[in-house]
Image: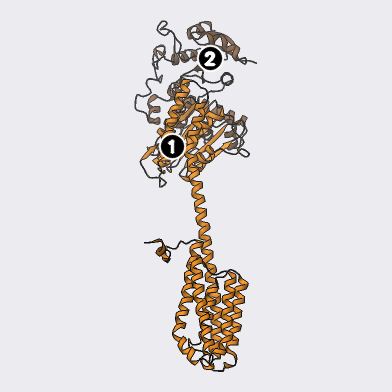
Amino acid sequence: MSGRSRLWRVRELPTTKAGVERAFSYFIAGVRLGTLAQMIPAVHGGVTTSPQGTAYLVCWAAAALASVAVSVATLVRRRPLGAYVSAADYSLACLLLVLAPLVLVPGERFGTWIAYQPGYALSVIITASGVRSLTLWAGGMFGIVACYAVYLGGSLDGEMTTTAIGNILTYVVYALVTRMFFGYTRRIAHDADESRARAAELARREEERRAQVMMHNGVAVMRLLTEPGTDAVRSRLLGLAEVEVQRMRSYLRGRSPDRNGEGSDVGLAALITRVCERFADLPVETLLDLGAAVRMPAGRAEAVERALESLLLNVREHARADAVVIHLDADVDAGWTLTVRDDGVGFDAVTAVPGVGLREVVVGELRRWGIGVDVESAAGAGTTVTISAGPAPAAVGAGRDTRTDAG
Amino acid sequence: MRPAVAVVDDASLIRESLGLLMPGLDVVAAVSTVEDLVRLRPVADLVVLDLHLANLEQQPDVRQGIAAIRALTGCGYRVCVYSQEERRFVLAACIAAGACGVVSKALPTARAEQLFLEAAGGGAVVPQPVVGILEVLVRRDCITLLSDRQRQILHGRARGLSYAQVAKQLFVSESTLRGYWLDVTRALTGSLRELTPGEIEHALGLAPGDLLEFWPGDVADDRDWWRTGTSR
């Protein structure tokens, strides 16, 4: 389908502000040309019966020209008319109503398209309600109502009074309804545009966060690799770097973590042991017996692995700890708690601004997986990070182990 | 007043430097074998014992490891193991054999000195891996003598929490908590000595016989007992 013909397909119009304005232009052209189509069959009769045939024809031609001009202008502009042209449109409708008694015989002012002026005025009220200025809209509407009263003039008798009042009410009601229609549709388009912009911004931030989560540990390892160290330390760091490279490759290939938590189960104790082997230079004690049976889906396990790795990188870089204890516990209700405690320099948890590692890789990412994280630290008193999932872990509890209960 | 400490270590550097590097200790004897110390019988608040004494092939009669601990505790000494040993069941076996503590040679000197002072002062220096084993034994009802409060303290300490953190959680002062912890460790190490390897294996989910290599059990002649290897 050509680009030109696509322009006319309403179903392909975007639901943006611009798309809505374009839809308005179709609506306005449709109403105005439809009105013109209704006027055409009666023009000959009007000229014949009019006391001023030429004047009638001139007025009719002015109305027809205005309808065509407004339709073309809105279609070309792809939006409703501006304030000045709308004012001219209202003025012409008023003028035609005022001149109508001069070119119509009294008996033809109601119920016939020979008297096209009221119908034409209604089409103007409907289509010009898209004008932005409230004053212009209200002024135009009341102007037409006033001119319609002039149009009625002395020909209003008891029989047609109700029809006349009905017509006036039609002007007012249609003006209000179309005004609401234009305004509400514009608001929807505005909100849709804002929502799209917000969604795009959120998507950008999410991608940025994912990149931070994926890259953070790798960057930390690279930084450590640039520092002087023994061959043994560098060898361990290279092993860690290899893991991070694989992670980054997987990110660059667009593989997303499985958010539904599906995938083959991974033993948490084995995973923790594997991570700790990459940090053999740290004084880490792993106490995993109580949680030896804890298993979880691969995606969730990967998040825990990254978080633990980030915590241990923090210990290596900042904590200056003499001892690190990693303790895993499982409770009766299939929940588990992983505690990572170091006796290093700690930090003031109130005033310190957490880095990307703690904020995103540990807290942010784990909470996205529904895993709770609590960080407790004080300057000079070490840091304790408690990671827990499932039912709330007992604070300092004395619960029985599931294994014993099972026999 | 500085506690009197006797050192048993086959490394002359450690024997000669311990007193200099740890000024809080009064080193009254520094020998290379347990037999020498038993022969000298110095008056000491604590014996700092290296777990793996060298020259095993040249001196097959020299006591090593558990046998050494038992010989010294049999003479009435408080024994604190000072070793690079990291295998948790070996460390636990030392406690079960009567050692009042195990201090890693990897620790900073000041920290090690502080732990020796605690041990000399009547405290129990239980290394973290052994605390973990004890917690499992308590949680799995292999050791049942602890009160709820004592179990709470063990819960916190097994996670590596400091005395201050556990004290804060339990609304007691730090000094009170240290006293509680001393009671807990005494009770637990006492219970550990009474457990058989089979009971521990069952509680920890190990296969029968897994601990035989490490655990002393009832050995008629403990001089012969030490099968954990001598590489460390």
Q: Which residue is mark 1?
A: A248
Q: How is the image coloured?
A: by chain
Residue A357 in view: yes
- Chain ID of residue with mark 1: A
In the rendering, what colour is chain A? orange
Left or right placement of residue B208 versus residue A148 in this view = left
Identify the residue at the far left of this view.
Answer: B208
Please rate how many residues cluster around mark 1, counting C-alpha atoms within 10 Å: few if below 14, some from 14 to 19, many from 20: some
Above-or-below relation of A184 to B48: below
Q: Which residue is mark 2?
A: B48
Q: Kindly identify the amino acid type of the residue bearing the numbered disc 1.
A: Met
Query: Where residue B128 sits: x, y (%)?
Result: 50, 27
* Residue A135 image-quadrant placement: bottom right
Left or right placement of residue A351 versus residue A13 in this view = right
Q: Nearer the viewer, residue B146 or A54?
A: A54
Discs 1 and 2 lie in a common subunit: no
